[in-house]
Image (cartoon, helix red, strand yellow):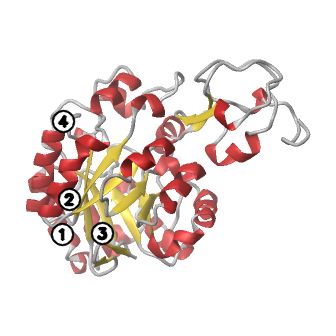
Amino acid sequence: MKIGARQIGDGAYVIAELGVNHDGSADQALAMTESAARAGAHAVKLQLFDADLLMSRASRLAAYQSASGERDPLEMLRRLQLSADDMAPVVRRAHELGLHAIVTVFSVPLVPEAERLPWDAYKAASPDLVHRPLLNALSATGRPLIVSTGAAEVGEIERALGWLGPARDRLALMQCVSAYPTPQDRAELGGVGVLGDLFDGPVGYSDHTPDLDTGGLAVAMGACLLEKHLTHDRSAAGPDHAASVDGAGLARYVTLAQQPGLFALDPRLDVPRVKRVLPEERDVRTLSRQSIVAARALPPGHRLAEGDLVVKRPGTGIEPWRLGEVVGRRLARAVEADCPLVEGDLRAGSAEAA
């Protein structure tokens, strides 16, 4: 797999995740891109989402978001979102600085928007491992694709790999723990090896620990890509700042990641070779995954068409990979607009028999 001209696997490739730590400011994202370049990162990553496309009326804050002072999930994301137009100068500046520009896209309708910019790669976030329509849309662009696997079971990863077969030569998987922050003793570095057993392409580690040497440990375990959240101020208000590193911290992180030999005999590498969902990931798994949602109020007996359905958070309803089997089914009861569909909403039987 290559990102730009870089062969992934030739040393540690470090992605500085800007995420939402720009606080909704394109100027702040530009400044953080400069910081990432000074730190020696190889890429910056942004997140392209539209709060109203992503969040249904059933959405709730994750515990770590509430702990950071947030009160309303929709208002939080509206405050933090950047459009593709906002991101254009950030992508341009990243390329001027010799960095790759990567973006996580959260909704299928935003993939054409993203395609207006010269991204070096796309990423699918951990919760969207079950969002087959989104994975297919990102794969269809022909760009390199990084897929994260936080809070995912092995069977879910294997299923997604089956969907992404045509993209295998430009695909990477990331081990991840979907807890913010993740204590280093819960980093699940043994999952890197499990992903390597499942997949013959590049495997990396998306690092939510507060520590600066976890990346080096992950590389010693076989990771060749790393992702670390970057912030302009760890004490700033917002959901992710406290679980991030500043520019100086990122520079140290990059240095350690490029010296995996330092960790060859480290006892912290003696961890179980296992990929599992930790108890502390359950909250984020449920609230950040997406479900099939009613696009409008629908009456009992209605036969569902594609236009009746959208995909939004939370993951409390029918998973998006089942969209094809839901279309054509009849409703057993009325469903309110912007509410996730659950099994009890559907009449028994297949779409053909419904």
* For the residues bearing labels 2 and 4, Cβ distance under 8 angstroms: no
Q: Quadrant of residue 66?
A: top left
Kind of element beneath mark 1: helix
Give the quarter of the figure containing the C terminus.
top right
Q: Amino acid at mark 4?
A: Ser
Kind of element beneath mark 2: loop
Disc sitting over residue 256 in the figure: 1
Q: Amino acid at mark 3?
A: Leu
Kind of element beneath mark 3: helix
The Cα atoms of the two marked residues, 4 and 3, are separated by 33 Å
227 versus 165 height, above or below: above
Report whether residue 317 is seen. no
Which circle's residue, 4 or 3, is located before the other in the chain?
A: 4
Which circle's residue, 2 or 3, is located before the other in the chain?
A: 2
Name the mark nearer the viewer: 4 or 3. Answer: 4
Residue highlighted by disc 3: 217
Q: Where is residue 233 drawn, in percent x and y?
A: 13, 40
Bin the neighbour count of mark 2 within 10 Å (Cα to Cα): few under 14, some 14-19, many 20 and up. many
Residue highlighted by disc 4: 25
Residue highlighted by disc 2: 212
Which circle's residue, 2 or 1, is located before the other in the chain?
A: 2
Q: Residue at x 61, y 64 (%)?
A: 158
Q: Residue at x 64, y 42 (%)?
A: 319
The Cα atoms of the two marked residues, 2 and 3, are separated by 10 Å
